[in-house]
Image (cartoon, rainbow, N blue to C red):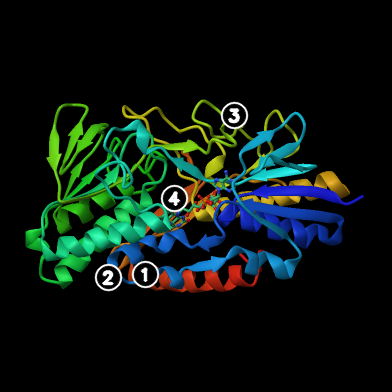
Amino acid sequence: MTTRIVVLGGSFGGLTAALELKRLLGGGADVTLVSDDDRFVFLPSLPWLIIGRRKPGDITLRVKDILGPKGINFIHGAALEVNAEASKVIIPDRRELPYDFLVVSTGPRLSFDEVPGLGPEKGHTDCAFTLEHAVKTGQAWRKLLETPGPVVLGSSQLVSCFGPSYELAFEMDAELRRLKMRHKVPIIYLTSEPYLGHMGVGGLGLSKRFIEDEFAERDIKPVVNQAIAEVAPGEIRLKDGARIPFKLAMIAPPFKGVPAVAPLGNPRGFIPVDKNYRHVKYRNIFAVGVAMAIAPPEATPVPTGVPKTGFMTLKMAKAAAAAIRADITGIAPPVAGELGVVCLMDMGGTAAYMRAYPVLPPRQSSYMKKTVLAKWLKLGFEKYFLWKMKRGLSVLP
Ligand SMILES: Cc1cc2nc3c(=O)[nH]c(=O)nc-3n(C[C@H](O)[C@H](O)[C@H](O)COP(=O)(O)OP(=O)(O)OC[C@H]3O[C@@H](n4cnc5c(N)ncnc54)[C@H](O)[C@@H]3O)c2cc1C
């Protein structure tokens, strides 16, 4: 009998899981991917889009063009709910999608509502985390270049993705210097991290000293260990009473699990899994990428979350697919190792290469180095990844 597999989410985790499952199981599996977005967006390039170095069409692919040639079904619509007891996903018009296995990769819910005045829709701040938000932030950036003023970049409490804010701080600094305008635009990096370079993982090698030095050299003023109480037009009000004026503020919001799958998860809606990314209670449900739960390595004074990077998400999706194949065919999955992370952080004219194994401390190894080679690698990686994804070559690294 054909095994019915449903995958939720059409991004790094969902696409990789669906492609891997089809590759491993062929005609033995009927794979259906459900996503509320019919595009794959290469999110790591959004900071470049904001600065004006990319257009939306440069970094998006059509999900159906990736899945169709591989014989994977695509439903463009939001999953509304998962009935884990009955193994069914509910999609619009109360249609039911029964499954033998479910892979959840629905990413974060950007929870702007938790901080009054935060966010590009109902609030007064911009954001870099979706294509639509980044396009809007790009417009705000161009306006700032016409009428310069203070910029605030960073993360509110309960964020679990810090890299893009660091990248934007470096990139905006470099761009303003190129335009000979840096002296007209003070840059503040505001964060819930207890110290610079913490990144939700307790730091990574020399990251604290590294970022401190680089920010000092570039005159980017850090304001760390802060929770935001509210945002008014042109002013961020911190919980400790301080106020930070801005002309442009790009602040990452608290992260939560998306409502359709949040009941499967912890109080923030992130899904608890074992080392094969299998739900701890519902054994035919897997969760990968931002949707799954990783406990922070330490309690920080202002709560922060552990990032699940694209690199980590691909590894998780492949491991989950191998575990599902094992359940169906009896072919043992590779022994699940500890998750490591490799990251390239753009810094304007150069970049930092970051590597940690495992992701959380104490670690076997960690490394961070600034090198122009990392910038070239980052540029090349974007082209490689879009090339690979367009062809559905999930087997490649
Ligand atoms: C600006 C930015 C820069 C980044 N830079 C890097 C980097 O340089 N290196 C790196 O390794 N990582 C980077 N990351 C992180 C990386 O993008 C994430 O790790 C990755 O996107 C996680 O993939 P995911 O599949 O878990 O979730 P997401 O990419 O968030 O995708 C979630 C998917 O689920 C869909 N969805 C949501 N709700 C539903 C629903 N109810 N029903 C159906 N579908 C739904 C969404 O439309 C989307 O397709 C960056 C992230 C951002 C935002």
Residue nearer the viewer, 77 or 163: 77
Circle 1 residue: 375
Q: Is mark 2 within 8 Å of ligand 1?
A: no
Residue at label 2?
A: 349
Q: Distance between the residues labelled 4 and 3?
A: 35 Å
Q: Pointers 2 and 1 in contact (CB under 8 A)?
A: yes
Mark 2 and mark 4 in contact (Cβ < 8 Å)?
A: no
Q: Which amino acid does label 3 sit on?
A: Pro
Give the vertical position of 96 relative to 173 (above or below).
above
Is residue 334 at all visible to an observer of this figure?
no
Question: Residue beneath label 3, please?
Answer: 263
Left/right of residue 181 with respect to residue 304 in the rendered view: left
Cα separation between marks 4 and 2: 24 Å
The residue beneath circle 4 is 366
* Residue 53 found in image quarter: bottom left
Q: Which residue of the protein is positioned furthest toward the left in this rendering?
A: 183
Q: Which residue is drawn at 36% across and 47% down?
A: 162
Of pointers 2 and 1, the one earlier in the residue sequence: 2
State the residue lying farthest toward the right: 1
Q: What element carries label 2?
A: loop
